[in-house]
Amino acid sequence: MKKTFRVLLITAVVLSVIIQSVSLAFAGDKNPLSIYVASDVHFRPDTVLPPIGEVQSLPGDPIFSHCNTKGMMTYEAGAIVDEFLSRFEQSDSEILLIPGDISEDGFFEEHLAIAEKLLQFKQRTGKRIFVIPGNHDIRTSKSKNRLDLEDFMDIYAEIGYDEAIEIHDTSASFTADLDSNYRLIGIDACVYREDNAVISESLYSWIEKQVQSAKADGKKMIAMVHHNVLEHFAIEGLAMGLLCVEDHRTFSSALADWGIKYVFTGHGHANDISAAVSAKGNRIYDIETGSLITYPNAYRKVTFSDECVDVKTEYIRNIDISLLPDGYTEEQLDMIQNDFVGYSLGSMRSGMRSFTTTIPDLIEDLSESLKIKEGTASYAVLEELLETLKNTVELPLYDKENTKEIDSVSEIAAFAGIELPESDYVDLVDIGAGIYAGFYAGDEALSLHGSTELKLLSNALNAILVYALVNLPLSPVNTLLAELGAFDLYFLPSTSVYTLAAKIAYLRTAGEKIAIELIAPVAGGIINDVSDPVDLDVILESYSETSDSFQNEVPLTFFGILKKLFEVFMETVSNIFRFFLGK
């Protein structure tokens, strides 16, 4: 009896161990997969940057004279990347995805510097990093200052590609297992030396083959592509393939039908999530992550489990100023240390404003296209016109210096009896930058009708028209028109005519009204989401679930696209009627 009991006891213990081991094994398979996503680093090391004090993108600005014309924090990039990697190291995530634009211009110095930083981090922490190139990364040229595909693969050989199951033979596309449940497919669709993206027949077939292989291995696939595969704002599809992968609706439908539900993208520097359903009823999400070195300096933490996909958006809110290159003023360092978010937003807005300073530089391209030779009277006229254009675009919103001249939007608006709302915006471009900052941030809350931004924007546009007409140098313009043979476009010699016409034009447009009613649909098509769900923190369905359709989704089918176009058309018609009926 005792012997029997002992045998039963031992058997029970052995079974318990076996059951526990099996349960642990299955539990291991069900452990959530946590990944970090950071995009569009656009890295340039300090060694290739001119001294910060010598850069005058926005001359006279005490804080942002060195601003990047794209709004990116180039001089602060190294410190931002270090802060991000520190956060990644302290997290429970073991995997980092970087969906392209690792470098700014594809130069060897840029790639070697950021690759060394990533590799040292990987070797020190044991955490895994996967990258694919963006349109800025492989700008193949005859000069060996820039990478070609083979160089890229060599430099990043130990950063993800050493774990590849398979690599596409004519691109940097690859597959790699993330854990026992999920497999990553990095898709390099970039057209080198260009800014667009195309899925070639070879790449298309290769992706389909990888999907079949993943299914045979029991893996769910997560994709990473630099360019968008779904639209993130209403008129993105009109951008001639510069933002989305060419024929993106067909491609995203194929991905959805192959079972690739989640795609991580970058390129647009915005934080946005779009959803769509293919004609066969399969769901796909495009999770776009903004530029790490551009306001609002966001990155993603995404957790995949059997229950859901949890997307969280986090931000770089501070950096170590001791890591910055030499040359910063005390005023700049103080703002970076005490108000990094404000500094980042200011960098973006200043960068966009600095575009106006480059307007006179258009002389070379314009003169070439018009076949006007340097040194001629027409060339001098063209230079004068560009300078006038620059001054017009830079027309300040408010008369801060209380001058007698009518040289601000608020003073011109006063002719129509319109008082501008108070704001911290500086000029027309600054308003646009402020609006676009909201788009970059995600979960845009801007209401176009009645918003301060649109009131200022509409009045600025009208005032600029007035200012341009009043200050147009008529005699030189007529000289240029004559040389170009455009006699029918001659301007009358009296400037007073144009001054009066400008004031009447402003009054008849009723200030902000025409812009709000007629421009709002276009502006909304640029800055407002085209699709649910929300952009920043959201719980989405798991790979094993199919949720109900959202109220707004990116249209992929012919009838869906037709319906969307009809809705935009009806909104535009409605606004036109509202305008003319005075409602």
Image (tube, grey):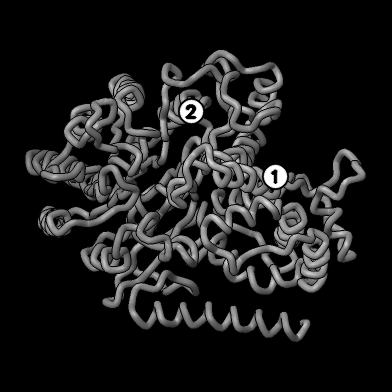
Residue drawn at point x = 39 percent, y = 79 percent? 560
- Using the rendered image of the protein, determine whether residue 2 is visible from the camera's viewpoint: yes
* Category of crowding for the residue at label 2, using alpha-carbon neighbours closer than 10 angstroms: few (below 14), some (14–19), many (at least 20): many
Position in image of residue 530 (x %, y %): 49, 66
Judged from the image, the secondary structure of the residue bearing numbered disc 2 is helix
Q: Is residue 18 left or right of residue 107?
A: left
- The label number, if any, that marks residue 77 in the structure image: 2
Q: Is residue 32 above or below residue 155?
A: below
- The label number, if any, that marks residue 391 in the structure image: 1
Residue drawn at point x = 72 percent, y = 60 percent? 465
Q: Is residue 189 above or below residue 144?
A: below
Residues at marks 2 and 1, CA–CA distance in whole angstroms: 32 Å
Q: Is residue 33 above or below residue 54?
A: below
* Category of crowding for the residue at label 1, using alpha-carbon neighbours closer than 10 angstroms: few (below 14), some (14–19), many (at least 20): some
Q: Nearer the viewer, residue 269 or 305?
A: 269
Disc 1 marks which amino acid? Asn
Q: State if disc 1 and disc 2 touch (CB < 8 Å).
A: no
